Amino acid sequence: MKISTKGRYGLTIMIELAKKHGEGPTSLKTIAQTHDLSEHYLEQLIAPLRNAGLVKSIRGAYGGYVLARDPGEITSGDIIRVLEGPISPVEGIEDEEPVKRQLWIRIRDAVKDVLDNTTLEDLANYNDMEQQDSYMFYI
């Protein structure tokens, strides 16, 4: 399964909103500038996320977007499904011979497991230094 820029940038939007959760609305312009992305493209991605009930828009001079639920209640799988569609490594699994079908199903289930068990809270709180220290060897 390949995640397109829709999914990748959609996750970027949602992680930024999770980092600012409880601080009020965040504009797409701010997110676009922070990550050097096209604001116009982010505007196209926010609509399906809003329609799916994952974000709310706040109007006005200090408006922007906020998460519709707590970051711990939204998974990366929720976001990817909205922007990319169903999670499947190949199309037409049912037409495959049994041995390959079983492999594709196992791959699909492993990907679903990771996406559905990784919340926005996990992603927003990720600390790169913690991950590096766990593999640091001292002599």
Image (cartoon, rainbow, N blue to C red):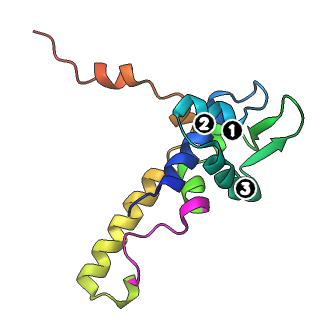
Residue 55 is left or right of residue 39, and the answer is: right
Q: Residue furthest left?
A: 139
Counting other residues with Cα less than 10 Å from the Cα at mark 2, is it few (<14), some (14-19), or many (20 or more)?
some
Residue 139 is left or right of residue 5, and the answer is: left
Instruction: Give the distance between the C-alpha atoms of the residues marked 2 and 3, in whole angstroms.
Output: 16 Å
Q: Which residue is mark 2?
A: 32
Residue 31 placed where, x, y %? Answer: 62, 34
Counting other residues with Cα less than 10 Å from the Cα at mark 3, is it few (<14), some (14-19), or many (20 or more)?
some
Residue 58 placed where, x, y %? Answer: 85, 39
Instruction: Give the distance between the C-alpha atoms of the residues marked 1 and 3, in whole angstroms.
Output: 12 Å
Residue 88 sits inside the magenta stretch: yes
Residue 80 is left or right of residue 45, and the answer is: left
Q: Which residue is mark 1?
A: 28
Of residues 67 and 106, the one nearer the viewer is 67
Looking at the rendered structure, the kind of residue marked 2 is Ala
Residues tagged 2 and 1 counted as in contact (Cβ below 8 A): yes
| x 46%, y 59%: residue | 112
Looking at the rendered structure, the kind of residue marked 3 is Ala
Which dot marks residue 68? none
Per the rendered image, the range of residues in magenta is 82-92
Q: Secondary structure at mark 2?
A: helix
